[in-house]
Image (cartoon, grey):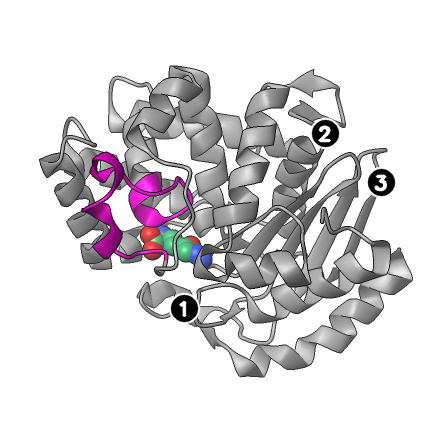
Amino acid sequence: MQRILDNIIKDTRKWTIEGQVASYIPELAKGDRDAVGICVTTLDGEEFFAGDYKTKFTIQSISKVITLMVAICDNGKDYVFSKVGMEPTEQPFNSITNLEGHDRNIPLNPMINSGAIAIVSLINGNSPEEKFERILRFMKKITGNDTISVNEEVYKSEKATGDRNRALAYFMKSTGVIEGDVEEVLDVYFRVCSIEVTCRDIARIGAVLANAGVMPWNDERVISREVSRIIKTIMVTCGMYDGSGKYAVHVGIPSKSGVGGGILGAVTRRMGIGVFGPSLDDHGNSIAGLKVLEALSKEFDLSIF
Ligand code: DON
């Protein structure tokens, strides 16, 4: 496995020049375009690393998997999916056009920005601080990493430039999808997106999903088998946004990307995968990350299809 990962990283690094580091959040533009790293966490407790796996990056949309877990734990799946749908979309991750004119005007799924903001609004807590702390605590638990924290510069940058997300959130307030103080909901969302992780942290989240909701390193259950199955299914259809179909054909692993360059993969009964490469394609997915996952999927026959 180690040799294969080293070779995959070596062979895929060339793809980074085909993409761009995200710049619509100005602080993310400082990312290293050439970086590529991977961690694989197998369910029998082995961990493998290659490339720039030590680099920290902000979790961004991969947090949508975590906030969905917490929201379902807090409210139950029926209530959560009465507020947010389960349908894929051909629109980009921050689109506003699909918030109106279909099934009760709810966001199409929890993996796009509108859906994730609505999901954050459902999380229990008496204040934005308490809501955020509960999510962070869950994140520390599911990664087994107590040192996880927010990148304050990215948080400030997101908050200062998040007008598209503000538009989505205020629109959803007008249609009754979001209740309460919109700015407070957004503040939690921006903070959660700005949490810093490494490939290992996201590989571990993938390993918990791969293991049907049980942390393989201590056998503790964090989410039910059913919730784990639901989330992996939505990752297949929506996790790579409007690139999810092509990704399913070429990789076939339930995955979630973030504009910080991370991709989380969960291979049921086998492994969690954390890939990092900040150079992104037009859909906002890591360009080398896609190639790494495609090569890994082929090498070890990981596609679910
Ligand atoms: O809200 C945003 O636009 C970012 N904080 C997260 C978007 C994102 O990661 C999309 N992913 N590929």
Q: Work out which quarter of the rendered image holds the N terminus and state it.
A: bottom right
Q: Amino acid at mark 2?
A: Asn
N-terminal of the two: label 1 or label 3? Answer: 1
Q: Amino acid at mark 1?
A: Ala
Q: CA distance from mark 3 to mark 2?
A: 14 Å
Query: Tag on residue 211?
Result: 2
Q: Position of residue 168 (x, y in %)?
A: 20, 48
On the picture, is 239 further left or further right than 254?
A: left
- The response on whether ligand 1 sits within 8 Å of label 2 is no
What residue is drawn where x is 70% and y is 36%?
Answer: 207
> Mark 1 highlights which residue?
22
Depicted 305 relative to depicted 283: above or below: above
Q: CA distance from mark 1 to mark 2?
A: 32 Å
On the picture, is 290 further left or further right than 302?
A: left
Query: Tag on residue 46?
Result: 3
Mark in the foreground, 1 or 2 = 2
Front residue of this view, candidates 169 and 174: 174
- The response on whether ligand 1 sits within 8 Å of label 1 is yes
On the picture, is 171 further left or further right than 227?
A: left
Question: How many circles with numbers are drawn on the protein?
Answer: 3
Residue 29 in view, yes or no: yes
N-terminal of the two: label 3 or label 2? Answer: 3
Q: Which residues are magenta?
A: 93-115
On the picture, is 286 further left or further right than 91?
A: right
